[in-house]
Image (cartoon, rainbow, N blue to C red):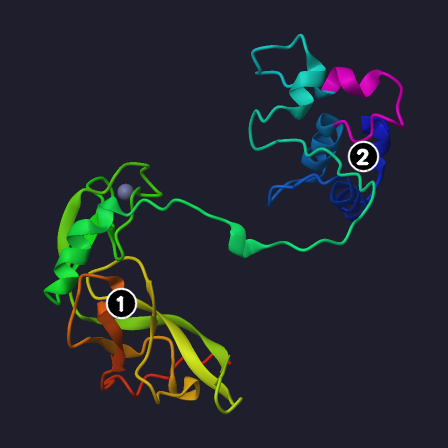
Amino acid sequence: MSKAELMKLTVAKLKALCQEKGITIPSGSKKADIVKLILESGATQEKSDKKAPAKKAPKESGDKTDSKLQKTQRKSMEYIKKEHVVTRTMEANWYLSSYKYKYNITHMQPFLEKMKEKKLVGLQCSNCNRVFFAPKLVCGNCLIKPDRWVDIRETGRISTFTVSYLVDDKTGEVIQKPIVLVQHDGSDTTWLAELSPGVRYQDTYIGMPVKVKWREDTEGSIDDIEYYEPLEDNAKDIPLRKDY
Ligand SMILES: [Zn+2]
């Protein structure tokens, strides 16, 4: 299909064509932009003769010689996905328990030592100043190693939560309890946690203030936090967000 032919189609049809061919359209694209994308992707190649391949070669790339190579190489966000052809299907079991993986926790050591003293510390990125709790090995924004330890308060708020359904081994009863993400005061990230036993998910809400409940005998592990206790919310007049 030539450019002129494509321009005659409606925007809806062009979008449908893009979807079919796996072309991503950036938001705010105009009709001409979409047509350009289709031509560059070579999606109409099979229907046209030899005009399309000449147009689709990226202008600013270093090696213009091998256009076949350019089609599969990831040069930019305009990566062209190869079409996936299903040849046959086969049923199989996937034993996930046999997988092993390495997880580097050397950066967690000062954090774990403080846990033993019932104190919380986060790791701060010296470039963007974000504080990670739990500590992260690399700042995802700056791609550098956060290297500044900062104190974190024992209090925080629930940033989101979900409900887990666990079957009691003895009674067979389904126990519904909230699993929460807590954002500690002083931290920019959240942390997966449980609330005190007996707190119903129906009473849990985003923004709920909570406080760490430590174990009696701490041993320098993330399990030293037994659970989080809800605190009295003195902002009760504000309508609470309940997304369920
Ligand atoms: Zn950073």
- Mark 2 or mark 1, which is nearer the start of the sequence? 2
Looking at numbered disc 1 in the image, what kind of residue is underneath it? Asp
Residue at position x 57%, y 33% in the image: 77
Q: Nearer the viewer, residue 61 or 146?
A: 146
**Element type at marker 1?**
helix
> In the displayed structure, does residue 93 sit left or right of residue 170?
right
> In the displayed structure, does residue 6 sit left or right of residue 96?
right
Q: Nearer the viewer, residue 162 or 11?
A: 162
Q: Residues within 10 Å of mark 1 (few under 14, many from 20)?
A: few
Q: Is residue 32 above or below residue 91?
A: above
Q: Is residue 95 above or below residue 83?
A: below
Tell whether circle 2 marks a residue whose Cβ is less than 8 angstroms from ligand 1: no
Residue at position x 74%, y 45% in the image: 19
The percent position of residue 199, horizontal first and vertical second, equals 35, 87
| C-alpha distance separating marks 1 and 2 | 62 Å
Which quarter of the rendering shows the N terminus?
top right
Which image quadrant is residue 26 in? top right
Q: Residue furthest top?
A: 65
Residue located beneath label 2 in the image: 7
Is 91 one of the magenta-colored residues? no
**Element type at marker 2?**
helix
> In the displayed structure, does residue 114 sit left or right of residue 107?
left
Is 53 one of the magenta-colored residues? yes
Question: Which of the labelled discs sits on residue 223, or is there none?
Answer: 1
Which image quadrant is residue 60 in? top right
Q: Which residues are magenta?
A: 42-55
Question: Which of the labelled discs sits on residue 34, or is there none?
Answer: none
